[in-house]
Amino acid sequence: MSEKKKPYFMVRVDEDKASAFKIAMRSRGQSAQFILEKAIDRYIEESKIVESSAQ
């Protein structure tokens, strides 16, 4: 069984946003990967809705 490789994304954010994000992760007990994957999923779904309504 081979492991599925996932792409890496490196992003820069403001220091205050990064600090707030780390605090929120600790308080909710979730990983950055989990949070960002959910945000990406929502963004993709929103994009599909916008594209379909534009047609």
Image (spheres, rainbow, N blue to C red):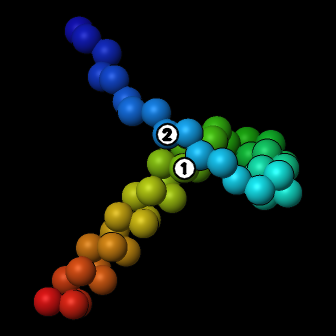
Residue 27 visible in the snapshot: no
Q: Is residue 9 left or right of residue 27?
A: left
Residue 52 to residue 18: above or below: below
Residue 17, how many percent across, how many down?
Answer: 78, 58
Q: Determine the residue positioned at 48% across, 48% down.
A: 37
- Residue furthest to the top in view is 1
Give the residue drawn at x 66%, y 48%.
12
Residue wearing tag 1: 36
Q: Residue 31: x and y, percent?
A: 64, 38
* Rendered residue at 14%/89% (across/down): 55
Toward the left, the furthest residue is 55
**Observer-nearest residue: 19 or 28?**
19
In which quadrant of the rendered view does residue 43 lie? bottom left
Give residue 9's mark. Answer: 2
- Identify the residue at horizontal 23%, vertical 9% (top origin): 1
Quarter assignment of residue 4 = top left
Q: Nearer the viewer, mark 1 or mark 2?
A: 2
Q: Is residue 22 left or right of residue 53?
A: right
Q: In the structure shown, which secondary structural element does the residue marked by tag 2 occupy?
A: loop
Amino acid residing under circle 1:
Leu
Q: Where residue 51 appears, x then y in whole percent?
A: 24, 80
Q: Nearer the viewer, residue 33 or 1?
A: 33
Residue extending farthest bottom: 54
Whether tag 1 and tag 2 are in contact, CB under 8 A, the answer is yes
Relative to 13, 27 lies left or right: right
Q: Secondary structure at mark 1?
A: helix
